[in-house]
Image (tube, helix red, strand yellow):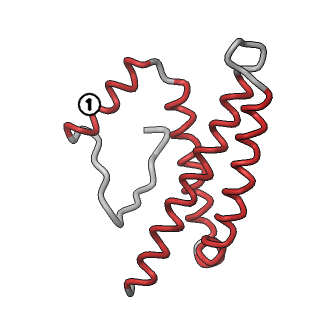
Amino acid sequence: MNDKEERLKKINHKALIALATSQILVETLDDLKGTNFYRQQRANQMNNTVKVLERFCDEHYDKTWKAEPELMQETEVSIEEILKQIVNAEPQRLITISKMLKKGAIVFVDNEHEDYDENA
């Protein structure tokens, strides 16, 4: 893979994370309806941000989706699931997850993809 392809791959990855994160924020704001924190103006601003990011993402990762649709779909769903778990986690649980990552209890290895057996 040449430098240009590698750079585009990184852009696609960041765009996907930005889009998934913004969608989770919109959902989180929706969950706050009826509270003092919720403001329709904030919700409208986030919805507009998501639309802008979707247009940006469409430009940058259309090719990747076409080349590896299953991997991209699984990646998007996984990012959204991780973000939902973070959004719903109690502060102490977030601290624990962070410590586990820092200590290497959870290790991510580049270019490896192993199927997780949910029944194990």
Which residue corresponds to the image point at 62% horizontal and 78% vertical from the top-left? 63
Report whether 111 appears left or right of 80: left
Q: Nearer the viewer, residue 19 or 78?
A: 19
User: Can you say whether 75 is above or below 3 in the image?
Assistant: above
Residue sitting at the far bottom: 2
The C terminus lies in quadrant: top left
Q: Nearer the viewer, residue 77 or 11?
A: 11
Crowding at label 1, few (<14), some or many (≥20) Cα neighbours within 10 Å? few
Which residue corresponds to the image point at 45% horizontal and 54% vertical from the top-left? 115
* x and y percentages locating residue 16 in the rendered image: 57, 58
Q: Nearer the viewer, residue 65 or 44?
A: 44
Which residue corresponds to the image point at 69% horizontal and 36% vertical from the top-left? 26
Q: Which residue is mark 1?
A: 99
**Label 1 residue SS:** helix
Report whether 72 appears left or right of 116: right
The N terminus lies in quadrant: bottom left
User: Can you tell which quarter of the image residue 10 is in?
Assistant: bottom left
Mark 1: amino acid: Lys
User: Can you tell which quarter of the image residue 114 is in?
Assistant: bottom left
Residue sitting at the far left: 103
User: Can you say whether 35 is above or below 113 in the image?
Assistant: above
Total label count?
Answer: 1
Which residue corresponds to the image point at 33% horizontal and 25% vertical from the top-left? 95
* x and y percentages locating residue 35 in the rendered image: 72, 13
User: Can you say whether 103 is above or below 90 in the image?
Assistant: below
* x and y percentages locating residue 91 in the rendered image: 42, 19
* x and y percentages locating residue 15 in the rendered image: 56, 60
User: Can you tell which quarter of the image residue 33 is in?
Assistant: top right
